[in-house]
Amino acid sequence: MLRPLPFGRRARLCGLAVVAFSSLLLSGCVLGVAWLPDSSGFFYAEKAKEGLSLTRFDVATKKRTVVVEDTKTMTLWPAVSPDGKQIAVARWWTEKGKRDTLQVIIYDLEGKAVKRSKVFPWVESKKDKSELDMTFLAWGTRGQVLVWAKDTAIYDVARDRIEKLPGGMAFPGSSNNPVRPDGKGFLALMGDKPSHLAFVDWAGKETKIEGDLPEGDDFPWGYTLTWQKDVAVLAGRSATLRVDTDKKKLKKEASTFPKLLPGADGKVEAAFAFPNSKHVVCVFRREKADPARPNERDSIELQNPAAETRKVIVPTCDVSQAIFFPSPDRKKVVLRYQEGVVKNERILVIDETGKVLAHFLAGGHEED
């Protein structure tokens, strides 16, 4: 497996949002989580024999249940249905000398495959070997699944049909639900010279949102999306964007992100502020690593800038892809990181009160 590029460096190298996402996929794995709609738990993917497994985690009981031992897909971000009863993955298979194929598989919460789509012809393969490729999913409110597999595709579950959305992707980030509450379409990032926001309906019709996007390492990955009827509010450390998908206009406002406390060991790489509390989860990156642990330059810290308090949760680790996965109610957040020479992966769950709800070794039974 290739080592992921550091978060800030990746964005600077790619520059544009859609291109950055492509580079992210090519640079390494960004295993995410898919929250249940009621925020009671989530699914996460882990490496299996052929592809990735699916494990369910219940926040209240801290119980982990392997739902599918091997999906035989490389779906890094699976998608939970709006009713919380099903979960979708997608198998993108590249075959040397032939056209790639794509298939969507839907499981119930017990791990039974309740639907397998047709095997759709996909992009022309440019690889010199046959293998699984990475996919990222989100689930719409009207029975459509959004699949990112080089291009974004809209899969209609009832009709078993798929439509491509060339040159764009649904607004990225697990739990950054890109689908508008009325279910008529979704927010997307389109183009690459430069990228722009658009509202896309389920027929794939794109309507451009007028307005310039922020320039900086934290867009779009450091932005949390919440909906206020037809307005998508994108909140980041550098700005707050109010995207009116009805009037098709973008308004840039000053960021409401709290000012972090100085004095941390390193430069802030990413941060997540709980909207209904004063707590902020931060990832800091040191300029130089400990020679004994050269790949671990990061630390994870919980701050309350208003109270001028801070607590180091993980003093040394590797958060090469610093992407937060907030729960739908925005009262909890998940961060995945690696540690040690063998790169053991851990999952950290924190709530808005600053309490660590869970901290465990992915794939194991150890609990901190």
Image (spheres, grey):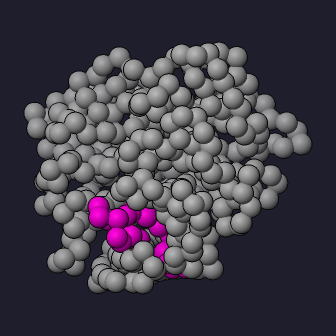
184 relative position to 81: left or right: left
180 relative position to 147: left or right: left
The answer, for residue 44, to whether it is visible in the render is no
Spot occupied by residue 185 in the image (x, y as percentages of width and height): 17, 52
Spot occupied by residue 307 in the image (x, y as percentages of width and height): 58, 16
Q: Residue pushed farthest front?
A: 61
Quarter of the picture containing the N terminus is bottom right
For image coordinates 25% across by 29% down, the residue present is 242
For image coordinates 58% across by 56% down, the residue present is 28
Q: For this rendering, which residue is in front, 154 or 366?
A: 366
Residue 211 sits in which quadrant? Answer: top left
Spot occupied by residue 54 in the image (x, y as percentages of width and height): 52, 71
The answer to whether residue 20 is above or below residue 3 is above
In reply to whether residue 87 is colored magenta, the answer given is: yes
The answer, for residue 367, to whether it is visible in the render is yes
Residue 89 sits in which quadrant? Answer: bottom left
23 relative position to 289: left or right: left
Magenta highlight range: 70-89
The answer to whether residue 99 is above or below residue 28 is below
The answer to whether residue 139 is above or below residue 214 is below
Spot occupied by residue 325 in the image (x, y as percentages of width and height): 48, 47
For image coordinates 39% across by 20% down, the residue present is 255
Q: For this rendering, which residue is in front, 123 or 257?
A: 257
